[in-house]
């Protein structure tokens, strides 16, 4: 795989990651936990089918050999899968409360620096890449996140009254609850980056697992985390019946989200193996650009003042500049 293809895969993963949250707009009153269980059940089946189709018996042999040589890579990957799903579940609650265009910037601001720091310290930086330039480019992406947040706040400044319109909260208590949950969720989401930096073999981390065994263990951990969070909630609230009774027009959103979520994880992992987590992770954080796009497409910015659109346009420009600087660090 060439460096250019690896960069393209990381950016493609960002599109998939930033797009599957659109499913939330189509669930109506269907339980969020039921949706996430469908998403992660499909995900774990999907990645194991792909892995067995590609590697066959070699899959189990690879995992067994890794367990014999260095079991910590396997345990860390499984636990990180569980940890990031806890954060993901909280993130979806935040998106329901605040809307895509406001929630994504808040969470990305923490995930960007936390994930990049973890990937640099644990995963390492490719030879010839300047850490200072990488951090500067990450700062550009952070500025993009902040401009996106400003656009959301300017949009909210013109909203009054109770309830919610176009997925944007209008009650102060919903806003503060969403902000608090966003901070808590952001403490768990970087578990994905930790697993990626430590568990996956890459150009800067030779001791990890190949891509497909890594993804299968990550998905298994994620599914276990979903059972411990979403499954327990569904049992406690007596809502499993709603899951079994739901029609395809509901389950299809979970299936599509699982395909986008772990389809993105797979191609991002292949890109990471070539260019390292320190480069692939911040490129993946351009997912915020697509979340902003879908927020606009679903009317979250409808009725916003001109300055909100100027802030949003600035955010888009900064996302593109940050991605260019990060990818360019591999070439010049």
Image (cartoon, grey):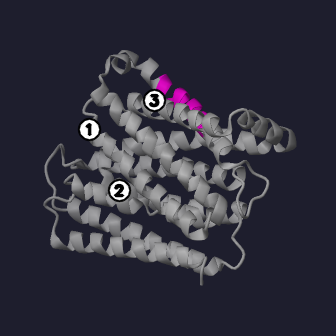
**Secondary structure category for the residue under label 1:** helix
**Secondary structure category for the residue under label 2:** helix
Mark 3 and mark 2: Cα distance apart in space: 22 Å
Q: Main secondary structure of the magenta part?
A: helix
- Who's the residue at 29% across and 55% down the image? 294
Q: Is residue 197 left or right of residue 291?
A: right
Give 193 or 261, whichever is nearer the viewer. 261
- Who's the residue at 47% across and 72% down the image? 323
User: Residue 146, image x and y in percent?
Assistant: 39, 68
- Residue bounds of the magenta highlight: 219-232
| Mark 1 / mark 3, whichever is N-terminal | 1
Give 154 or 3, whichever is nearer the viewer. 3
Give 72 or 257, whichever is nearer the viewer. 257
Residue for badge 2: 291
| Mark 1 / mark 2, whichever is N-terminal | 1
Q: Is residue 215 left or right of residue 164?
A: right
Q: Is residue 27 above or below residue 178?
A: above
| Residue 276 visible in the picture | no
Mark 1 and mark 3: Cα distance apart in space: 16 Å
Determine which quarter of the picture holds residue 101: bottom left
Q: Is residue 269 above or below residue 309?
A: above
- Who's the residue at 72% across and 75% down the image? 127
Determine which quarter of the picture holds residue 197: bottom right
**Secondary structure category for the residue under label 3:** helix
Residue for badge 3: 37
Residue for badge 1: 26
Crowd band around label 1 with a 10 angstrom C-alpha radius: few (<14), some (14–19), many (20+): few
Q: Is residue 224 magenta?
A: yes
């Amino acid at each position: 795989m060439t460096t250019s293809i690896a960069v393209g895969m990381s950016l493609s993963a960002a599109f998939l990651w930033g797009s599957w949250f659109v499913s939330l707009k189509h669930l109506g009153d269907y339980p969020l936990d039921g949706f996430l269980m469908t998403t992660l059940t499909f995900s774990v089946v999907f990645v194991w089918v792909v892995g067995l189709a590609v590697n066959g018996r070699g899959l189990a042999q690879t995992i067994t050999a890794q367990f014999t040589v260095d079991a910590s890579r396997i345990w860390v990957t499984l636990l990180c899968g569980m940890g990031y799903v806890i954060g993901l579940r909280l993130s979806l609650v935040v998106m329901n409360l605040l809307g895509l265009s406001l929630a994504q910037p808040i969470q990305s601001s923490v995930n960007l620096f936390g994930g990049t720091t973890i990937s640099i310290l644990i995963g390492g930086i490719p030879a010839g890449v300047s850490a200072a330039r990488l951090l500067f480019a990450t700062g550009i992406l952070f500025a993009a996140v902040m401009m996106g947040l400003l656009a959301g706040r300017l949009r909210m400044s013109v909203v009054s009254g109770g309830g919610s319109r176009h997925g944007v909260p209008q009650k102060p208590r919903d806003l503060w609850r969403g902000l608090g949950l966003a901070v808590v969720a952001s403490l768990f989401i970087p578990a994905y980056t930790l697993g990626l930096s430590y568990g996956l073999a890459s150009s800067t981390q030779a001791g990890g697992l190949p891509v497909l065994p890594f993804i299968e263990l990550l998905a298994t951990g994620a599914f276990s985390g979903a059972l411990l969070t979403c499954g327990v909630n569904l049992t406690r609230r007596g809502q499993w019946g709603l899951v079994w009774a739901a029609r395809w027009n509901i389950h299809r959103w979970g299936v599509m989200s699982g395909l986008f979520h772990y389809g993105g994880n797979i191609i991002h992992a292949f890109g990471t193996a070539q260019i390292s987590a320190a480069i692939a992770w911040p490129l993946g954080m351009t997912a915020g650009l697509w979340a902003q796009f879908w927020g606009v497409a679903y009317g979250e910015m409808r009725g916003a003042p001109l300055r909100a659109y100027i802030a949003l346009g600035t955010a888009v420009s900064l996302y593109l500049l940050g991605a260019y600087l990060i990818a360019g660090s591999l070439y010049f």
